[in-house]
Image (cartoon, helix red, strand yellow):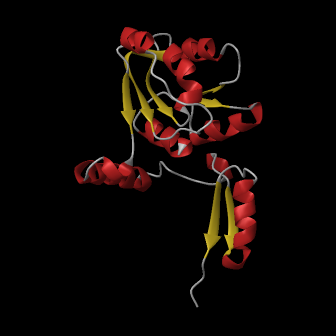
Amino acid sequence: MGHAAIQLARWAGATVIATVSTAEKAAYPTAAGAQYVVNYRDADAAEQIRSHAPDGVDIVVEVAIGANQELDLAVLRPRGTIAVYANNGDQPFEVDIRANMGLNARYQFVLLYSVGWHLLKTAAEDINAAIAAGALPVGDQAGLPLHHFTLDQTAAAHEAVESGATGKVLITVSQS
């Protein structure tokens, strides 16, 4: 999801600051198009992000709101949005009323099943336009490694996912 978010944001003309958990993972968002990459585990991660966005970031795309809320609020601009599409489950999410009110922060929870057909149709049109424009490449060179397995290798594909394979695990089902 982060890979597509980076590519779609760049296609739309945004400056992208991506966060990663290790230096080894920094190459992936860079290849996807992020102009800046920050290790969110660094003690000065907020300062690093603010060095690229002194007024704060407009939108945070968040997959681990419970774990990242403090950093998100430290880098969000006033009236900015935190778009939440998941929580990694490690930490619960509790709203810090004072910090959020001070920023006039907006949370946008995203679950495609409930956004409505009009928005799904609009999103599909935009994504199709991005695909037609070549804005969503995949593979190592685009920062999204692909791991291919055949149907009879399904167990190995599951093992790859369970062991934390970076990128996408794909199973090819041939039709005979």
**What's the residue at 70%, 23% (across, down)?**
41
**What's the residue at 56%, 37% (across, down)?**
33
**What's the residue at 70%, 14% (across, down)?**
43
Locate residue 103 relative to residue 35 in the image: left or right. Answer: left
Residue 50 percent across, percent down from the top left: 55, 13
Q: Is residue 54 above or below residue 146?
A: above
**What's the residue at 63%, 35% (across, down)?**
90
Q: Quadrant of the C terminus?
A: bottom right
Locate residue 57 relative to residue 158 in the image: left or right. Answer: left
* Nearer the observer, 163 or 148: 163
| Residue 46 in sight in this render | yes
Residue 7 percent across, percent down from the top left: 50, 42
* Nearer the observer, 76 or 8: 76
Q: Residue furthest left?
A: 118
Residue 104 percent across, percent down from the top left: 34, 14
Residue 64 percent across, percent down from the top left: 56, 34
Q: How many marks?
A: 0
* Nearer the observer, 97 or 55: 97
Locate residue 168 relative to residue 65 in the image: left or right. Answer: right
Q: Quadrant of residue 138?
A: bottom right
Q: Residue furthest bottom?
A: 176
Locate residue 33 relative to residue 78 in the image: left or right. Answer: right
| Residue 35 in sight in this render | no
Q: Is residue 122 above or below residue 157?
A: above
